[in-house]
Structures are given as C-alpha cells and as structure tokens.
Image: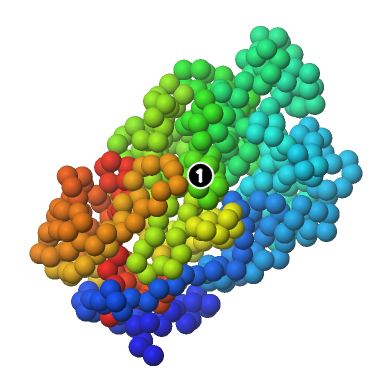
Amino acid sequence: MDKNLIKCATAGMGVCLALTGSGCGEAASSLPAEKPIEEIETGSVNSGASLHDPQVIIAEDGTYYCYGTHMTAATSTDLSSWKSWADGVNGSNPIYDNLLTEPFDAFSFVGKNTESGYSVWAPSVIYNQTTGKYMMYFCTTSSYIKSNIVFATSDDIGGPYHYEKTIVYSGFTKSDLEQTNFYELMGDDVQTRNRYVSGGAYNNQLWPNAIDPAMFYDEDQRLWMVYGSWSGGIFLLELDPETGEPIRPQTDDETQTDAYFGKRLVGGFHNPIEGPYIQYHAESGYYYLFLSYGNLQTDGGYQIRVFRSEAPDGPYTDATGATLGLTDDLDNFANYGVKLMGNYTLPSLNVTYMAPGGQSTFEDRDGKLYVVYHQRFKNMGEFHAVRVHQMAMNEDGWPCIFPFATCGESLSEEGYETKDLSGTFYVLDHGLEINNLVNEAAAATFADGKISGAVSGTYEVTGGTNFITLNVDGVTYKGVLIQMTDEAGNSTFNITAVGENNHAIWGVHYLQ
C-alpha cells in the first residue's frame, strides 16, 4: 500500500506517523506532487457515537469524556473513535444517581414533555478548582420556553452525578411563579414581576429560554455560565465557585444586564441563535463565543458561528467589528457572526455533511484547539454523529476549522513559503446563508501568488509560518495552512481562512 494513503494507523494512541506526504504529523516544507482528480479516493468516517450537543472534558489519564443531550455519554482515546456507555433518560442510566428518583425536584416546575417523559438536555461538565468536584450543568424542559437550568456534582469525571439544585427558571407565568426561585431572589413587587411577565404570560421575546448552559473560567479564574436559546437571546451569569450558584448582578438596562437572568450577550426577539459556548484563549487574549444558528434538523440550515471579546461579559463582535445585541440589527442576524461551518461537500467525501452545530470547544494538553459538534448527513434523516475537528488561530486571532475530522495532525514547525502553494485547490466558501443548500467546492489554480479558475485573486504566505493571506474576489482572508489525511485516506494540503466579510473558506489540495 502506498504510504501516502495510510490513515493514521497509530491514531488510537494519540500519535500519527510522520511520513513524508502522509499528511499526519508535521508537514514538510516541500510538498509531494498533486494527485489527479480521477485518483482521489472517496470515503468518510463514522465516530461510532451519536450524541447531540456534545461537550468534551479530559480525564486525568488523558481519556476524553463526551456528554450529550438525552443523558448520553461516550469516551475516546483519539477523538476519532468513540465508545458509548450511557444513553436514555431512565433510572438505570449511570450518569446520575438521584435525578430520576422521588421527589423529581429537577422536573417539579417544567413537568413532563409532550411524549409524557422527562427531557434532559445539553449537559456541560467542568472541574471546580475550588471544591475539587466535577460540576455538570444541564437543563430540563417541557416546551420551547418552559425550562430550567440545574446542576449536579460528582467526585469522579464519569459520575454518578448527584442533583443539587435548580438555579435558573424560564417560561414562568403569573400563576406558577411561586414554583420557581423568583420571589426568593427578586421579591414580590408587582412592577418587578411585570418586567418578565406580560399579560400573565412569560415575555420570551426579551428573556431567555433557560437551556444550553456552558461554563468557563476567565483570565482571573472567575467562573461563568453562558446559556440561552432563541427567545430573548444568549445570557451570561457569574457563578459562585463555592456553591455553584449564580452571582446575581444589578439590573442595568443600558448594558442589557438583568438581576435575574444576567447579561445579554447577543440575540433576542426569538431569532434562531442557540448553543452558546465560550472559550478563553490566553495566547490571543480573546474570549470566543461559539453559537449555532438556524434549525437543528438536517434541512434546517444549522451552522457554527463565532464572535469574540476582550472581556468575558462582552461586547462580543464579529470580523466586521459588529455586535448583535437587542438594540442592533437583529432583523438581519444572518449577516453577523463569523460562519465557520455549514452544509458542505468535498471531492473526496462520499457523503454530504449537513447541519453541523450544538458545538463546544476545548484546548488539549498539548495546546491544540478542537471543536466538537454533532453532524447530520444528507439523505440519512435525522441521524447524527459526534465529530471533532482541530482548529487554529489565524494571524488576526480568529479560529479557523480544519476541513477534515482530526486524526492527530500538527501544524508544521518549519512553515511554508508562497512557492509551496501550486496546483489545483478545491475552494469552498461557507457563505452566510441559513438554509438547506449545500456549499460545494470548485477547482481553482494557484500559481506564483495568483488564483484563477472558479475564483480569482492573490495569495501570500508569511514565510516560515503556517499563515496565509488571500484576496479572493476582492475580499481579504487570513488563514492557516495544514497538511493532514482526509477521511478517505488521501494526503491533503489545506487552507482554512476567515474573511473580513464573516465568511470562512477552505481550500483542499490533494497530494500523491
């Protein structure tokens, strides 16, 4: 077998063979010859686990633990193959010990869902540096507005997690407000109550659906929780590390800060923005707010977006410098936020990838950055699978997702020169659309710093680095170069870049 087609045989141990032209490990500065299109292998990968809204946390022994909606869990040693060990909202599920036992406190407000069962969604786990416990925040819900966020604790990363308390409620009305913690925290003043309840009903145009929690530590080791979905937008609350409960701020409408729900970061008026996850990146100095736009179904246009901020509580802006709070241009929300990934296909894939989202991110112990999400597929209904792609920061500090599922690839230590980019690149623009249309790659020729064919423009590599600047059809993109094995076993050389127009583009060059 041609060594260029070996697919990370040692990836199960977290290592890839550094073979010239293999695409795994450190890339050499002189690339192998181009592979003709008729010789490109086609294929895809199956992670072996189907988890919605996946989030990864690393155990002390290096094992990757992934938790997802509907009380699902899986583990992996290589971020490619996952072994499921929990699934289903039932009392025998080993993730929790008391969640589904009397008196069912976590469901006392929301009740059962339309299928007469209990809904447990979008868990997020963090190690509490103060208490020495693992803390899992998740939501229980029964409708698109009636939800709450609860948390559970465990001494072990794999659980069982013990339900502790419900901390944030949404969807309350005048008649059931006493079932929440609202009066305890906010008092029984009628004017205060009417801030959230209008005509006896919850005002979900301004206030959040309390789901999709995700925690993070900031630069000063303060603990925060971001949450929210559609409804009134994405909100942020600081957490008390001793108790795990929110530290309620003072209301300040000018900064869109609310004493009960916290600070609104983006969204509102029931626009389809959800699944928030914030990661602080010390090297760039930014906090990155990753989001899912659209509907999660296969044809719903689900996609991954990102904003960033120099402070944990914002303001969060996109590559154009714009933010998207309640007073901003929410009618045209699709134009805001860098779209990192949407529906797409590439020449070497035998499936079309649809509706990526429900994402989280993490930095591994070796400093590599990853995005974890659930992936749907064209003509496969609503089946979804866990996917992990590596990403890297461009020269302007924007994350760029690598085009293929990770298999242990590393950025080149020697870097590249402009002359190294020569031949056919299949260029894909993820655009800004939110629909079921598929973004397809088109062939373009790169030669002597110029691009021609399906797209036209120029390119220049920052010599001796992995950074590239492109001008494509009049738009400047800053990106990263990575050599890696694709999902069919082909050796590839790739461009992944973010534009000043909020678009992300990929360029894939197939190698012998």
- Answer yes or no: is residue 281 visible: no
Name the residue nearer the viewer: 154 or 270. Answer: 270
Where's residue 124, x and y in %? 62, 49
Where's residue 116, x and y in %? 81, 42
Where's residue 354, x and y in %? 48, 54
The residue lying at 65 percent from left, 64 percent from top is 74
Q: Residue furthest right?
A: 102
Q: Residue furthest front?
A: 379
Q: Is residue 105 rendered to the left or right of residue 435?
A: right
* Quadrant in which residue 434 is drawn: top left
Name the residue nearer the viewer: 44 or 175. Answer: 44
The residue lying at 67 percent from left, 60 percent from top is 73
The residue lying at 20 percent from left, 45 percent from top is 475
Where's residue 42, x and y in %? 40, 73
The residue lying at 46 percent from left, 24 percent from top is 326
Q: Which residue is mark 1?
A: 300
> Callout 1: 10 Å neighbours few (<14), some, many (20+)?
some
Name the residue nearer the viewer: 244 or 70. Answer: 70
- Answer yes or no: is residue 431 visible: yes
Q: Amino acid at mark 1?
A: Gly
Q: Residue furthest bottom?
A: 1
Q: Is residue 320 rendered to the left or right of residue 139?
A: left
Q: Where's the N terminus, which quadrant?
A: bottom left
* Quadrant in which residue 246 is drawn: top right
Asked if 180 appears above or below 471 in the picture, the reply is: above
